[in-house]
Amino acid sequence: MAAFFFPSPVPVPVPVPVPVPNPWIRRGVASSSTSPAPLRSSFAGRQLRPQPAQSFEPASPIRRFEAVEAKAPRRAPVDPEAIPPISQAIPTRLNINPAGTGRFGFGSNSELWNGRLAMLGLVAGLGQEAVTGQGIFAQIGLDRPLDKLLVLLALLGVSAATSIGYIAINTADRAPQEEP
């Protein structure tokens, strides 16, 4: 078994089975179903020779890009006045504007890192709960139900203020603007 996992430094000769003619088998068919020798195919002694590959040449060589170009319709030139200006094409709502900084200064990169750090904070809090066996509120000293109620009210207040600010900004964006 050790020779299987660790190769020996000296090559070991492997016995090669030699085909022995069997009198019970003739032309690939056994004379009885209980013959002691295994059945052999009539193709056992033959060698298959590969046939030479036939080359295929089309009647007329046509390149693909020429065929596609012939089928494509011609486009009419685009009128530059028909294209809307960029200020009308890009909406300027909460976080989307041409400068890319957003209304509160949050860009896409800032939002990306904010989300990553929030995920790390959640995993750290769950890990701390698993190690200490206490909840997050108990770890920071908020064991009483009144303390938990105050934290809940503070979170609801922050959520309400954020929602009201978001609604106010969107209604200001939708208000008709006076043209000079």
Image (cartoon, helix red, strand yellow):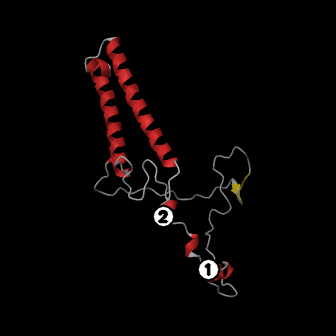
The foreground one among 87 and 107 is: 87
Judge from the rendering whether residue 16 lies leftward or rightward of residue 139; answer left or right: right
Residue at figure coordinates x 63%, y 81% from the top left = 69
The residue pinned by badge 1 equals: 64
Q: Secondary structure at mark 2?
A: helix
Q: Quadrant of residue 147?
A: top left
Q: Amino acid at mark 1?
A: Arg
The residue pinned by badge 2 equals: 86
Judge from the rendering whether residue 11 lies leftward or rightward of residue 163; answer left or right: left
Residue 98 drawn at (x, y percent): 42, 59
The foreground one among 156 and 5 is: 156
Relative height, residue 153 to residue 176 (above, below): above
In the picture, the disc for residue 171 is none
Q: Is residue 12 visible?
A: yes
Q: Secondary structure at mark 1?
A: helix
Image quadrant occupied by the N terminus? top left
The foreground one among 119 and 20 is: 119
